[in-house]
Image (cartoon, grey):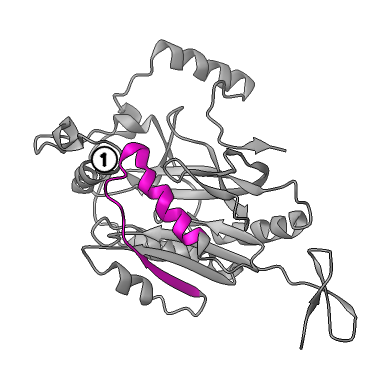
Amino acid sequence: MKLIFSYSPLLWRGAGGEVKNKPMKVAGFTFVRNAIKYDYPIVEAIQSILPICDEVVVAVGNSEDGTLELIQSIQDPKIKIITTIWDDQLREGGKVLAVETNKAFQAISKDVDWCFYIQGDECLHEKYLPIVQQAMKDYLNQPAVEGLLFDYKHFYGSYDYYAQSRRWYRKEIRVVRNQPQISSYKDAQGFRKAGRKLKVKQIPAEIYHYGWVKPPEGYKLKFRDFGKMYHENHENSEVAKETFEFTFDNAGTLIPFADTHPKVFQPRVERMNWKLTFDPSKVSYQPSLKEKILGWIEKITGYRMFEYKNYQKI
């Protein structure tokens, strides 16, 4: 049937002139490289958003392992794979991560309305799927809303604890409109539109971040190789040396997790084959006087002063 589009973004006209609602279309997008080498839960990340997506674009970078075959093994017709070559010279501030994110974003079908970004170490609990989907519908015809803002839970050391401190970002944009002026920002943590912050709505949904859940030996590999994407002279740094010893001081406060993990993630949780060898209540990191004062103010008022926000809430 030939479609004649009306002026409304939500309506189209059939061949007989009848006005009909245009179905909302949603795409997921992500990027990945060496997922097996670094044990990224990229399959679970993709599977967690698949139910509310019409397509999911995965930019698979040149890898040293079977990452491409891993993504192909998902065998879902919604998945659209593009292969990319990373520019390893783009080290300043992790810029290469934003470049790869943009490659996936730009490969999304032009008729898509909303784009759900998920990183390779993140996951969306199934309980949030209807909330995200409803928010997309509610704001679809409100062009002032350029994205949706999610809360974050950062798991650390084990699937049984998550970290809290001023060092961890509490919120980030993970759904954006399919507009060419929007692009990934800095190290792909968030987005900008023509250089300015996106205008977003906070929604009652949370992204689970698992990038710091690794066996003890996995942390050394993460620090040594991931740092190469941020620093020109990383090879000469302390964390690149064989004598480097990882500590949990970076975590801040570790809080026991009493809820459930996403169903798609549960098999990975059950495969955990290491035990924490430290007392989470005795993490040796000591906040500075400034951090103590700001933490006290936040505890009393609920407001986090001087928090970095790469978005504008409306």
Name the quarter where the N terminus is drawn.
bottom right
Residue bearing mark 1 = 227
Horizontally, residue 260 falls left or right of residue 270, namely right
Foreground pick, 86 / 267? 86
Image x and y of residue 183, in percent:
53, 49
Which residue is found at the position 45% from the left and 12% from the top?
Answer: 290
Decide if residue 137 is on the left or right side of residue 49: right
Q: Amino acid at mark 1?
A: Gly
Which of the 4 quarters of the picture holds residue 62?
A: bottom left
Indicate the position of residue 293 as horizontal and vertical percent values: 49, 13
- Judging depth in this view, the residue of 273 and 174 nearest the camera is 174
Q: Is residue 159 visible?
A: no
- Kindly give the residue lying farthest to the left in the view shown: 242
Q: Residue furthest bottom?
A: 1
Which x, y percent locates residue 27? 57, 65
Q: Up-down: is 75 above or below 144?
A: below
Q: Which span of residues is magenta-colored? A: 79-105
